[in-house]
Image: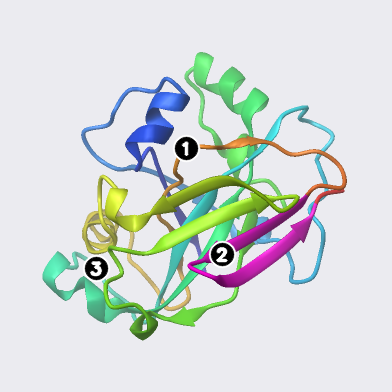
Amino acid sequence: MKLICIGRNYTDHIEELENEKPTDPVVFLKPDTSILLKKQPFFIPDFSNDIHHEVEVLIKIKKVGKYIDRKFAHKYYDEVSLGIDFTARDLQSSLKKKGLPWEKAKAFDGAAVIGKWISKEEFSDVDNIDFRLEKNKEIVQQGNTKLMLWKINELIEYVSKYFTLKIGDVIFTGTPAGVGSVKTDDILTGYISDKQLFSIKIK
């Protein structure tokens, strides 16, 4: 399986990091070794002093597809979840300044949290899903998929031009504003509407 991540998909997040608004989705990959194991804490790696949380709505691909038209994209996933794209912001900034790839800052071990999966049938519209991240019981990020620059079906169409989508692949659809640093003993809890889909302790 592979994790396909979308960057700069919410205008407010683009603005908070002072990035340029893209003309196409920004795409990067994480390996399956970046998935944080269930019930395990997230350990701050020794190569960064500024790990940021980025909460994102996830979808899981259920069948193989290539060059998928967006009008058929809804047939390629049945489940939705919430996760975190942990980012070593200091390392990422250094790599970006040198024009180098981001993988060391985004794809390290434990950098991807995947919450509980729920049926997309629970939503009347996947392009209108409220979600939030709480840090120590205070809301730090909140968003709605209607605010995405590229909606879920558009992302499936776009990504499948470049990568064959396979069963079990996960698409991280981008993060809203509010990203910030984590520190030891923080508790991060993610919700879609009022359903808690994950809770992670930082160590």
Quarter holding residue 23: top left
Q: Main secondary structure of the magenta part?
A: strand
Q: Nearer the viewer, mark 1 or mark 3?
A: 1
Quarter holding residue 116: bottom right
Residue 161 horizontal/vertical position (percent): 23, 56
Q: What stretch of residues is rendered in magenta?
A: 187-201
* Label drawn at residue 177: 1
Residue 133 horizontal/vertical position (percent): 59, 53
The answer to whether residue 111 of the structure is visible from this angle is no
The numbered mark, 1 or 3, whose residue comes first in the sequence reads 3
Task: Give the spatial CA distance, label 3 vs label 2.
Answer: 31 Å
The residue that mark 3 highlights is: 66
Amino acid at pointer 1? Ala
* Label drawn at residue 191: 2
The answer to whether residue 53 of the structure is visible from this angle is yes
Residue 101 horizontal/vertical position (percent): 51, 31
Residue drawn at point x = 61 percent, y = 70 percent = 196
* Residue nearer the viewer, 3 or 194: 194
* Residue nearer the viewer, 200 or 155: 200
* Marks 1 and 3 close (CB-CB < 8 Å): no
Amino acid at pointer 2? Tyr
Tag 2's secondary structure? strand
Tag 1's secondary structure? loop
Left or right of residue 174, residue 125 in this image = left
* Marks 3 and 2 close (CB-CB < 8 Å): no
